[in-house]
Image (spheres, rainbow, N blue to C red):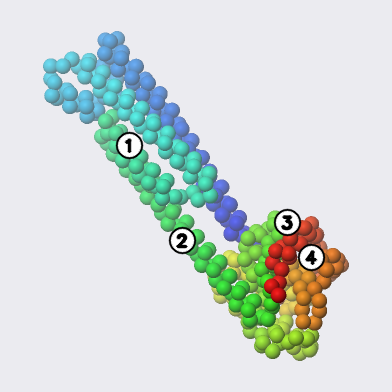
Amino acid sequence: MLRKTRTNKEQQETIRRRMAHIGQVLGGICRIAMIGLTVLAIVIGVAAALIAAGIVEPGVFSGVYARNPIYLLLRTIIAEMDERFIAAIGCTVTALTFLGMALLVRGLKRTMADTAISGKPFTHEAAKEIRRTAFIMLIGMLYNPFFGIALSLSLLLLSYFVEYGVYLQEQADLTQAIQEEMIVSFAEITENKSGQTGQHVKRVSEYARVIARELGADDETIRLASTMHDIGKLMIPESILEKPGKLTDEEYAVMKQHTTYGGKLLENVEGEVMQVARTVALEHHEREDGKGYPTGKKDISLEGRIVAVADVYDALTSRRSYKEAWEEDRAFDEIRRNSGTQFDPQVVDAFLRCREEISHIREMYADRE
Ligand SMILES: [Fe+2]
Ligand SMILES: [Fe+2]
């Protein structure tokens, strides 16, 4: 049975889905506000015409223009002007204000939609756009100063919320980048010191990625984590690592310890990829039938079971001082033959289904002679 952990990719996917959802909700709110403002603008515009034509008494629509600064100004400076005309002008100004606000909300709706669709939900550009809209929304003061200021401040607050989101996103990206750099350095050191000529680590991690993807697991995490599967070899004496012939029983017992050493090296390192790397370092020589090492356990993680197949396939198809590289067909048969005993049958099946891709990776990262 496949056991899956909650991985980076899944978490990112969940965040992306939530952001898309928030974007959709905000987009929906913007759409309703846009329609509402446009309808209000039309109704108030009609009201202005009715008031000017003397069909409706201005007092009926006093709520629309009573706090309108243009109306108040006109009433103060031109005392003799007919209230009907001043009210009609006030209504017209309010109608135009609402229309302008509807257009601004339309722009904001587009930004929200773009932001939600993109992989990175928070951007400086989106924050800047919202801030710009916040300032222009001060036109709402033409309807009612308090309303205009409140609306503008709310949008300003939203823009700072988006900026904070950008900051959090950047921090997360930085942590991920540092972790990946560390992993690559570790993998290079291991490869140089472990006496493995060529590109064993690169090939194993690529095979593991392909198998993980075939099984629907987090292929990127497994690819990165598996580059450190032999990191414990840093603690094994060079005399054993670089011995040209086959190892004696004693030497082999020492060599086997690279699994527990790897586990110890990665014990206190934080981060999800590093935790998977630790599991892989510990379990990549365990076997389905419990005859593996270091513990002989049968309850092996999916990552450990995947790297076990990838590692053995690469060992078989690579040249060693004591053996020639096997032909691909023979290596695939060997993996199939050991399905259910050494390897997890589901992992073997996935591996065999990707035969073409595995073969391509082998050619692409062939050993440099
Ligand atoms: Fe190993
Ligand atoms: Fe290995």
Who comes first in sequence, dot 3 or dot 1? 1
- Tag 2's secondary structure? helix
Residue at the (51%, 67%) spot, across then down: 178
Residue 214: assigned label: 3
- Which residue is label 2 attached to? 171
- Tag 3's secondary structure? helix
- Tag 1's secondary structure? helix
Q: Are marks 3 and 4 in contact (CB under 8 Å)?
A: no
- Residue type, numbered disc 1: Met
Q: Are marks 3 and 1 in contact (CB under 8 Å)?
A: no
Residue 194: assigned label: none
- Residue type, numbered disc 3: Glu
244 relative to 21, above or below: below
- Which residue is label 4 attached to? 344
234 relative to 278, above or below: below
Residue at the (61%, 73%) spot, across then down: 187
Who comes first in sequence, dot 4 or dot 1? 1
Residue 196 in the figure: left or right of residue 23: right
- Which residue is label 1 attached to? 137
Residue 96: quadrant of the picture: top left
Q: CA distance from mark 4 to mark 1?
A: 63 Å
- Residue type, numbered disc 2: Gln
